[in-house]
């Protein structure tokens, strides 16, 4: 017999008419949904002085949150659609003779796990929204109920006759293919891996928001993620991640065998940094299966060789702990890797807080050369290296970042640029280019984000 599965679709429209009460100490805010689904806010101000600056701030916060909700909404809507299709196909299939599949069950498990993760991610997002708005609106409760209902449906589907679930595997494969096609579309020019036969960055693609961090914790705002920039044999698809709720401490790192495991939060290894080797600042990278990060006592550049599990450090005597990037503290040593090798960027008293760019000799773990740039470290969002050129970024507004400066180590020439790109969230703690896939990786306030980079081939 075919079990009766009820699909209760989330009423997302009304659920998203959340009430931004956080920015109003007094007064009175109500929200409702207009005839075409738009959010209508009624604000009663008890005061005669109009707090224009706070309204502006609130608008910025709202815009940011709305973007976030939009992304999640799209995902959820697409899953709703999928579930409807799956249910229909399950019904169609149930009248056929069931043939037990001997293979493919692992894939099915993986698919369900992905769906569950998406739901958990959405739940984490709703919690984040709720916390940041300090709202106890019943609308949030109904959102939670809807998520639980969808999770229940996923569980029901999973326990249903496994032979029919092959359909779901096929659907997921299609969806995955679509996602890949979407990414490929962004890449107007095929990456020419390892080739520096170009005159620099032309543009940065749209942000690809992968998901919230592996701790599923929006409060883990300070961290980094990415790929090994020069993988050793057997670890070509390895990803890394690490984060914490404060920029002052780096306690651990997670490595993942491949992209799927990163998405599933199935770490290959968890490296718990022993006492005395803890880091800070979150501007680390992984290069040749070795993590390069900032260590605070003594203040030095440190590496953890994941192959040998050995630690080593070098003090850069000129480097100062006084200068961080604009978005968070403790970012004194910023590591980078490009087609030419390893780099570290710092600021010193001698440089008067401007970024000094240094080339690291991988073998001796020493500085082999260095250059002074004109960028005040504290005014930059972050910096990264591509083909021996340092690029520095700065904030334009809450959702726009700009590459505003480039320094070429080959010609010692500097350039002002205005290459703008979108951010998902205002602040980020780690931005690095990876020469192995020519993408930018950003840890954007708790979210994994990546970008395609286009080069000027003139
Ligand atoms: C909110 O507005 C209503 C109607 O204007 C009023 O009765 C109520 O006291 C207000 N509440 C607060 C907390 O200001
Ligand atoms: C949130 O609201 C509660 C009660 O309305 C209040 O006690 C608390 O201080 C608020 N928290 C923040 C961070 O505004
Ligand atoms: C969730 O499911 C429960 C029972 O399964 C039902 O009573 C409730 O109305 C559902 N809620 C939504 C929002 O679909
Ligand atoms: C570099 O690019 C230019 C123009 O696209 C081309 O003419 C030249 O042959 C290329 N050189 C190398 C070494 O690939
Ligand atoms: C890491 O350790 C391995 C094994 O001892 C060694 O072969 C490799 O050169 C080391 N890499 C770095 C970057 O220190």
Image (tube, helix red, strand yellow):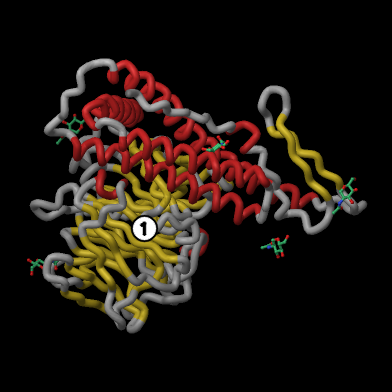
> Whole-percent x and y of residue 212?
42, 50
321 shown above or below 240: below
At a point 42% along the width and 55% down the height, the residue shown is 216
Is 341 on the left-hand or right-hand side of 32?
left
At a point 82% along the width and 43% down the height, the residue shown is 43
At a point 34% along the width and 46% down the height, the residue shown is 440
> Whole-percent x and y of residue 299?
35, 80
Is 159 on the left-hand or right-hand side of 380?
left
Q: Nearer the viewer, residue 236 or 274?
A: 274
> Whole-percent x and y of residue 147?
50, 41
327 shown above or below 82: below
> Whole-percent x and y of residue 203?
39, 36
For label 1, being within 8 Å of ligand 5 is answered: no
At a point 48% along the width and 54% down the height, the residue shown is 445
90 shown above or below 251: above
Q: Nearer the viewer, residue 192 or 390?
A: 192
Number of marks in the rendered image: 1
The C terminus lies in which quarter of the figure? top left
Most extreme residue toward the left is 233
Number of other residues with Cα within 10 Å of mark 1, as a class: few under 14, some 14 to 19, many 20 or more: many
Q: Which residue is mark 1?
A: 224
């Amino acid at each position: 017999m075919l079990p009766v599965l009820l699909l209760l679709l989330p009423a997302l429209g009304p659920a998203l008419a959340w009430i931004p009460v956080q920015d109003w100490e007094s007064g009175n805010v109500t929200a409702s949904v207009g005839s075409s689904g738009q959010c209508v806010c009624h604000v009663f101000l008890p005061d005669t002085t109009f707090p224009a600056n706070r309204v502006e701030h609130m608008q910025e916060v709202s815009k940011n949150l709305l973007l976030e909700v939009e992304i999640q909404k799209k995902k959820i809507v697409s899953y709703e659609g999928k579930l409807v299709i799956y249910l229909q196909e399950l019904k169609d299939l149930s009248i056929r003779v069931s043939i037990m599949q001997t293979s493919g069950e692992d894939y099915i498990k993986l698919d369900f796990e992905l769906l569950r993760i998406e739901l958990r991610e959405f739940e984490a997002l709703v919690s984040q929204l709720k916390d940041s708005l300090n709202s106890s609106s019943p609308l949030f409760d109904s959102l939670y109920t809807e998520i639980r209902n969808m999770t229940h449906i996923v569980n029901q589907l999973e326990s249903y006759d496994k032979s029919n679930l092959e359909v779901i595997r096929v659907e997921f494969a299609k969806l995955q293919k679509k996602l890949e096609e979407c990414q490929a579309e962004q890449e107007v020019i095929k990456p020419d891996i390892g080739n520096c036969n170009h005159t620099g960055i032309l543009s940065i693609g749209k942000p690809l928001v992968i998901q919230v961090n592996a701790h599923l914790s929006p409060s883990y705002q300070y961290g980094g993620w990415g790929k090994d920039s020069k993988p050793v044999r057997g670890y070509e698809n390895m990803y890394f991640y690490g984060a914490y709720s404060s920029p002052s401490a780096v306690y651990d790192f997670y490595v993942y065998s491949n992209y799927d495991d990163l998405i599933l939060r199935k770490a290959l290894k968890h490296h718990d940094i022993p006492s005395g080797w803890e880091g800070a600042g979150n501007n680390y990278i992984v290069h040749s299966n070795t993590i390069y990060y900032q260590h605070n006592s003594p203040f030095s550049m440190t590496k953890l060789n994941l192959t040998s599990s050995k630690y080593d450090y070098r003090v850069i005597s000129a480097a100062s702990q006084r200068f961080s990037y604009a978005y968070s503290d403790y970012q004194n040593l910023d590591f980078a890797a490009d087609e030419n090798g390893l780099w570290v960027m710092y600021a010193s008293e001698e440089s008067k807080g401007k970024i000094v760019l240094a080339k690291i000799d991988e073998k001796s773990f020493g500085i082999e050369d260095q250059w002074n740039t004109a960028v005040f470290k504290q005014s930059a969002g972050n910096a990264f290296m591509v083909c021996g050129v340092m690029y520095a970024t700065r904030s334009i507004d809450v959702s726009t970042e700009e590459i505003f400066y480039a320094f070429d180590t080959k010609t010692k020439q500097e350039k002002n640029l205005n290459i703008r790109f979108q951010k998902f969230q205002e602040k980020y703690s780690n931005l690095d280019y990876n020469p192995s896939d020519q993408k930018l990786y950003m840890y954007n306030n708790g979210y994994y984000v990546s970008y395609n980079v286009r080069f000027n081939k003139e």
